[in-house]
């Protein structure tokens, strides 16, 4: 992953950071990461298959 550009902060009158400006590419990567984590969380309780079981299912369905 390439080096990330530093975000620029927007500050209030007291100098407290209130917002950040990011390059759009970095913002989109963050959104994708959040989406990926949400999918993992949603599927946490699903049963899993072994590699061999998956291969057999794919063969049976004509996908392998």
Image (cartoon, helix red, strand yellow):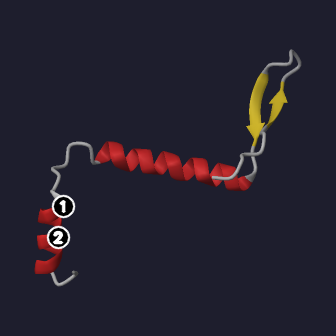
Mark seen at residue 18: none
The C terminus is located in which quarter? bottom left
The image position of residue 24, as x and y in percent, is: 72, 54
Instruction: Please state the horizontal and vertical placement of residue 17, each as a whole percent of the image.
Output: 78, 24
User: Badge 2: how crowded within 10 Å, few (<14), some, or many (20+)?
Assistant: some
User: Where residue 55 sits: x, y (%)?
Assistant: 17, 70
Q: Residues within 10 Å of mark 1 (few under 14, many from 20)?
A: few
Q: Where is residue 3 in the image (x, y as percent from the top left)?
A: 72, 47
The residue that appears at 27% across and 48% down in the rendered structure is 43
To which residue does mark 1 refer?
Answer: 51
| The furthest residue to the front | 52
Q: Is mark 2 on a helix, strand or loop?
A: helix
Q: How far apart are marks 1 and 2 (CA)?
A: 6 Å
Q: Is residue 17 above or below residue 6?
A: above
Marks 1 & 2, CB-CB < 8 Å contact: yes
Q: For this rendering, which residue is in front, 33 or 53?
A: 53
Residue corresponding to mark 2 = 55
Who's the residue at 59% across and 47% down the image?
30
Tell me if 9 is positioned left or right of 27 in this view: right
Residue at x 53%, y 53% (from the top left corner)? 32
* Between 58 and 20, the one nearer to me in the picture: 58
- Furthest toward the top, the residue is 14
Q: Which residue is drawn at 10% across and 79% down?
A: 60
Asked which secondary structure carries label 1, the reply is helix
- 52 to 34, vertically: above or below: below
């Amino acid at each position: 992953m390439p080096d990330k550009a530093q975000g620029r902060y927007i500050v209030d009158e007291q100098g407290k950071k209130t917002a950040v400006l990011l390059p759009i590419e970095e913002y989109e990567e963050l959104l994708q990461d959040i989406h990926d984590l949400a999918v993992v969380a949603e599927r946490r309780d699903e049963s899993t298959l072994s590699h061999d079981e998956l291969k057999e299912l794919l063969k049976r369905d004509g996908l392998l």
